[in-house]
Amino acid sequence: MNEINVCFGNQVKQIRLEKGLTQDSLAVMSGLERSQLSKIESGLVDVQISTVQKLSNALKVEIGELMQTRDLSMHPFVKWAGGKTQLLDRLIALMPKEYKDYYEPFIGGGALFFKVKPRHPHINDMNDELLSAYRCFLKKDSCDRLMAKLDEYDKNHSEDNYLIVRALDKDKNWQANADDVERAARMIYLNKACFNGLFRVNSKGFFNVPSGKKKTVNAYDKVNFINVLGYFSVSKPVITHEDFSKAVNNAKSGDFVYFDPPYDTWDDKSSFTSYDKEGFGKKDQARLADCFRELDKKGVKVMLSNHNTKYINELYSGFEINVVNAKRMINSVASGRGDVEEVIIRNFK
């Protein structure tokens, strides 16, 4: 079944019901056979543009409204350190109400991205293993292969198999030949099967998190994958793997950039920055602040999340700073988990 057709059919059905129309009445109004309309709403047929136009006229809505996927419910497909699910309401309340293109240079799990479903997204990350998964949703074939590979991992899950899959990044032949689907499936499976959902690599770039000792693993939500595929087919996100400063080079006045970087470290507890082998230190935080100010000068709307540390407050002095409470549950050290204060920093009111 074509997921785009499913999305379109759901939208037609939702608008029809909102207008109080039956399938019979809409069939008459649009000049379509009722049986054809039923198949359209069920996502069972490829819809011609002429049919879309007939439905648009009958429902008295723009074609764009019929084709949109903003009603899709999506959520992150991996558990990611620093994920923003618990702060979504606060973040959305502080976002600009209107903006042009959307940029998220540290996409991570993408909680905000999947919630707001921007029409013109540009997403980036320093972790190319993670990006391999996002790229799989650009095409139906790669998404289908990803689901099939994850089904295989789920079926064969065991402690021994976990260790075998974890060690693949040390296999030079696998590294040289694995495509996005294979790399994405491995990353997602390990994320679901490892201890505490922690993605961590050592100084050589090898994934080194121990097993979560789970008897079974359910690596993905099929409905969520289908919805992400449908959303990507319409929004056509630009996906890049480069330094955050380069990822926002094309941002212009009226665009919106959300920075959710690896956080500044606390002085009195363990903080986690090992998303990749390079880490993210004080100098990187300073570079990010410089980038924030350059975007501000260009008229770009910018929002940033970080720990509420003295250093971060000094870096962003003069901007709007809101303090929020959050819980951090992903850390290899217990002292790095629990209640923390974060800041949401903006260059707009």
Image (spheres, rainbow, N blue to C red):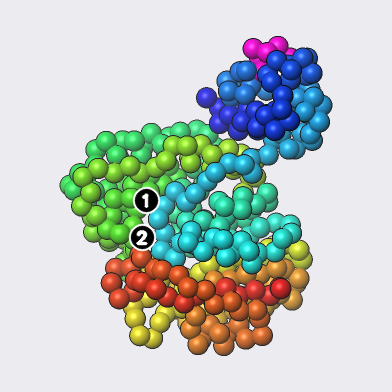
Q: Position of residue 215 (x, y in %)?
A: 21, 45
Element marked by disc 2 = loop
Badge 2: residue crowd in 10 Å (few <14, some 14–19, many ≥20) = many
Q: Residue 16's quadrant in the figure?
A: top right
Horizontal relation, residue 241 to residue 292: left or right:
left
The residue lying toward the viewer, choosing from 150 and 99, is 99
Task: Determine which residue is flagged by label 1.
Answer: 187
Q: Amino acid at mark 1?
A: Met
Magenta span contains residue 84? no
Identify the residue shown where x is 70% and y is 11%: 33
Does the CB distance between marks 2 and 1 fall below 8 Å?
A: yes
Task: Determine which residue is flagged by label 2.
Answer: 199
Q: Is residue 277 visible?
A: no
Q: Is residue 31 above or below residue 67?
A: above
Element marked by disc 1 = helix
Q: Amino acid at mark 2?
A: Phe
Q: In the rendered structure, which segment of residues is drawn in magenta? A: 32-37
First of labels 2, 1 by sequence position: 1
Horizontal relation, residue 311 to residue 17: left or right:
left
